[in-house]
Image (cartoon, helix red, strand yellow):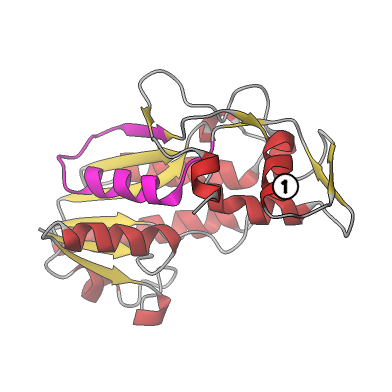
Amino acid sequence: MKISVIGGTGLIGSQVVNILNASGHEAVPSSPSSGLDLLSGQGLPEALTGADVVVNLSNSPTFDDASPDFFRTTMTNLLSAAKDAGVGHAVILSIVGVDLVPDLVYYRAKVLQEDILKAGPIPYSIVRSTQFFEFMTSVLSWTSDDTIVRLPHTLVQPIASADIAQAVADVSVGSPLHGTRDIAGPEVFPLDELGKITLAARDDHRTVVTDDSAGMFAAVQGDALIAKDGAVIAKTTYQEWLAR
């Protein structure tokens, strides 16, 4: 099976490509470095030539008001090119609970991307993941200084990128779901507690202060980002990942 992986050189995409190729499939990564521009459509016909499946792991360069236009344009361009190329299955990666956080413009943009895919001409699958372990470095940097890291008490259920990549690879070689598959890590943490665990593991002596107005995840209410019944629960714990 030939699988075009858009964003195939990134954190998730590169792992998906490796998993698929190791399984005997032909996974071809495409990204700006290979001449692909999803916003203009340049390079899309070449990226999709002969592909049975397209996996779209591209992401908006910002989380702000520009993100809806990015996902609207890129998803529309991709589906049009995929139809022309005769692609039989389109897969995207989204976020668990993305439709439950309307106050975040980036999350609304991801819902828009999902809706465009659902309404499009290609049989589809959506993999929704909880937050990446690897994302904690960015989260800690958003509202910190030399001595304090401010984090809300938001509940999260983080997951290793390797487990996400495996889930995406599994879905991409299966029949289209015409729906969504959720995947999450095995543990639930308040984000401020996860910050303390992370800093301790890094021998970082800054203090975590609970601040429910701090950072992007302050907009999340209750258990919106926690996997619900039916989700696939990955095995890698946060402490196991930190120890690697």
At 22% from the left and 48% from the top, the residue drawn is 172
Residue 227, image x, y percentages: 47, 26
Find residue 29 and report its image quarter: bottom left
Residue 98, image x, y percentages: 53, 35
* Residue 5 makes an appearance in the image: yes
Q: Residue furthest top?
A: 229
Find residue 179 and report its image quarter: top left
- Is the N terminus in the top left, top right, bottom left or bottom right quadrant? bottom left
Residue 97, image x, y percentages: 52, 31
The amino acid type found where label 1 is placed reads Ala
Above or below, comparing residue 132 to residue 16 in the picture: above
Find residue 18 and report its image quarter: bottom left
Residue 223, image x, y percentages: 60, 23
Magenta segment boundaries in residue numbering? 158-183
Q: Is residue 165 magenta?
A: yes
Question: Which residue bears the numbered disc 1?
Answer: 200
